[in-house]
Image (spheres, rainbow, N blue to C red):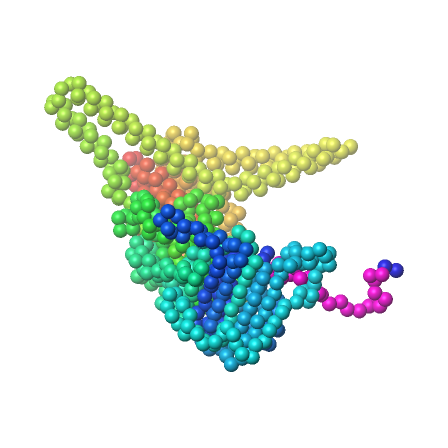
Amino acid sequence: MDKRIPIDLKGTLSPRPYARLLTMIGDQLIKNEKIALFELIKNSYDADADWVQVRLNNFKEVYDNNEQLIEIIAKPDSFIEIEDDGHGMSWEVLSDAWMNPASPIKYLEKKKGSRKSPQKKRLLQGEKGIGRFAVFKIGSTVEITTRTKNGDEISLFSDLSKYDQDLFTEVGKEEVKYLDQINYNYEIKSSPEHFVERTINIQNSRVSSKSYGTLIKISNLKKGGLDLKKIDEIINDVNKLSSPFSEENVTKDFIFDLLINNSSRFKDDKFKDKLDSLLEKAPLKVTNGNFDNLKFEFNLNGNNRVISFETLSGFKVFKDRFIDSKTGKLKRDPECGPFKFQFYIFDLGKDAPLKYHFDVNDEDKTFIKNHRIYLYRDGVRVYPYGDPNDDWIGIDVKRGITRAGDSLSNDQTIGYLSISNESNPDLKDKTNREGLLEIGNSYEDFITLIQSFFAYLHKEFIKYKDANKDKSVIQSVKKSVVPNQLDLFKEYLSDKIEPVKRKEFADLVSQYHAERKYLIEKAEISEDLASVGLTVEAASHDLMTMIRRAKETMDFLMRMSNAGNADQEKITENLEKLRGEITFIEDQIKGIQPVFRSSRRKKKDFRISEIIKTVRKYYDVLLNQYKIELKVEEVGAPLVIRTNEAVLLQTFINLIDNAVYWLSTVDKDDKQISIMIDGNNYEVVFADNGPGISEDDEPYIFESFFSTKGDRGRGLGLYIARQLLERNEFSIEYGKNKKILSGANFLVDFNTDGDN
């Protein structure tokens, strides 16, 4: 029998961790020294410390020609100290908690309802019981000296430098150590040596130190660890440990200092002061934001706003996660709890109005780009959210997979989100202290809600951009003001200058007309191509379904032809089936062809009711899927319009596409689209009983790239419909005065000066 197999055939086994767990938790799990130090600083905060000081000792300093410190380099005798005047650790805490990974002491306190520290009533940040092992990310030799009020001073010394850091074998030996074989030396001093009442320099001010606290000394530092850039980043991070956006500063009584060779490096980056000075340059200011009960309530540029569940359902990112695609009903509530928020959206474009404009090398512009959206839990920052290279909400990722103008960018957004442990217990820190755990639904639900809100903000930003367009220039182009003025000027000069100059000016005017005609044709071609896309998309579902069926039929026929004694009757039956499927595909393609530019040359008479029947075929599947009833009513004489078929197809495809989309987001049984064709007045009223269009959005719905669908919308459908109609002297408007259903109502007017 194998000697490793026990004599007893049944029994129990207990896990015994290897010593390498220490470096896995500390050195390998935590990304860098900056995060490690930040974690130790937060431990001091939890310990009710008035101050914490990080001291880098015996480091080599490198200066430039202006005697400015540009780098620090660790030497063999360099060491780092982290000292605070917190409540210190008793022997029980040191032996039972500090010594043992994943100690549940803080977690158990929270479970009992003691979420706050005993003296300063700070909301406790840590609970996993592993943050202390961040020391091993910085160095391999650690000495801890600690004392509680009126307690003994205790020193604990561990030296892991004598072990191989991967396997924890001693030099020259092969035995791999278990965790319980690693020994720490301790000493209990009845008369304190370090924690005595004394004076200490904190941020260049003399303060009286308490006779208790904790001092951690780390030596045998890791190579290539802390540099000056990381040191300054730590200082900036601690400056934003408490939210600079909020009036409530939960760390106002927590002082941080950092010394390099006994010289304080600390500086307040004045983030809050700088931010306050920039607020007026943000076109969109979102303040007092709160999400709860499927509703966003906030203040936008001084006006109270509410985004209801109905509006949220229109955003694709929200709809995909929370809405049942068949019923339009909410599948489930978001599993994250309520949260607060505040955002500032800046315009960094070259064409920004003077009030919001930034010069190319403006320091304010750099400041904005160096800050992102911060996350605070109970008033304390969740690291590293808010760093300039952090895209935790996925704003820039989305810009990378869509047209850049379809969403806001991280560069132009500064803000914060605030959660609490009590209302969001499932939004927990990752073990490596880099953000939140991405498990379960809570995290993804939280991100989806934020992305939905940013889809709304993008719509508001488009409104701002549109409001600042030079409308006079647009109208000038539409009315051909410049060409007309040039023609008048040419006529005026006809007898004022010599023939040679007159001809040169006439040639210049002709060239301008030719270029203008070319650019207008290019713009129209672009609009036409964009309009083709939606038509193809509308028909593509049925086309792809039938193409798959045709392929299946062909595969069946091929299998039969390769088999012996094929059933001729079956072959004939399936050939007829294949012909029918190909005929359907042909009919669909013919239905799309009128929207291609090559098919638009001739104008014909088209009966509107027949056009609507054609368009309806594209949407039969979706109408049935979402249980939408489409009614068509003709009033008076049949409405016949002389135009290109594509103009009519595009108009009604866009209207039906929008109506189907918004009706798919509502939770109601009687979903309706109603089309009233008035042949006597040459009008069509197109309506649905969906959520409708808000008064704030009405002025913008026909503008290019404006969409109320968030990232689902292209913002081109209604714009293109209006452009095509206007080219033919028709018009479309939001029909508030001719409303036949409770949702969106559009009036298409076919009255022209020509013959209809």
Q: Residue at x 30, y 35 (%)?
A: 755
Residue 109 at least partly seen: no
Give 109 or 194, whichever is nearer the viewer. Answer: 194
Q: Residue at x 78, y 32 (%)?
A: 564
Give 743 or 295, whichever is nearer the viewer. Answer: 295
Q: Residue at x 53, y 66 (%)?
A: 216
| Majority secondary structure in the magenta region | loop
Magenta segment, which residues? 3-25
Q: Residue at x 45, y 46 (%)?
A: 399
Asked if the stretch drawn in magenta spans residue 700, the answer is no
Q: Quadrant of the N terminus?
A: bottom right
Q: Tell me if residue 699 comes above or below residue 25 in the rendering.
A: above
Residue 687: x and y, percent? 39, 51
Q: Tell me if residue 127 comes above or below residue 502 in the rendering.
A: below
Left or right: 43 in relation to 508: right
Left or right: 696 in relation to 4: left
Left or right: 502 in relation to 468: left
Number of numbered discs overlaid on the protein picture = 0
Residue 357 at least partly seen: yes
Residue 57: x and y, percent? 48, 60
Q: Quadrant of the C terminus?
A: top left
In the picture as drawn, the residue positioned furthest to the top comes out as 500
Give 556 or 261, whichever is nearer the viewer. Answer: 261
- Examine the image and state in which quarter residue 107 appears: bottom right
Asked if the stretch drawn in magenta spans residue 15, the answer is yes
Q: Tell me if residue 623 comes above or below residue 203 in the rendering.
A: above
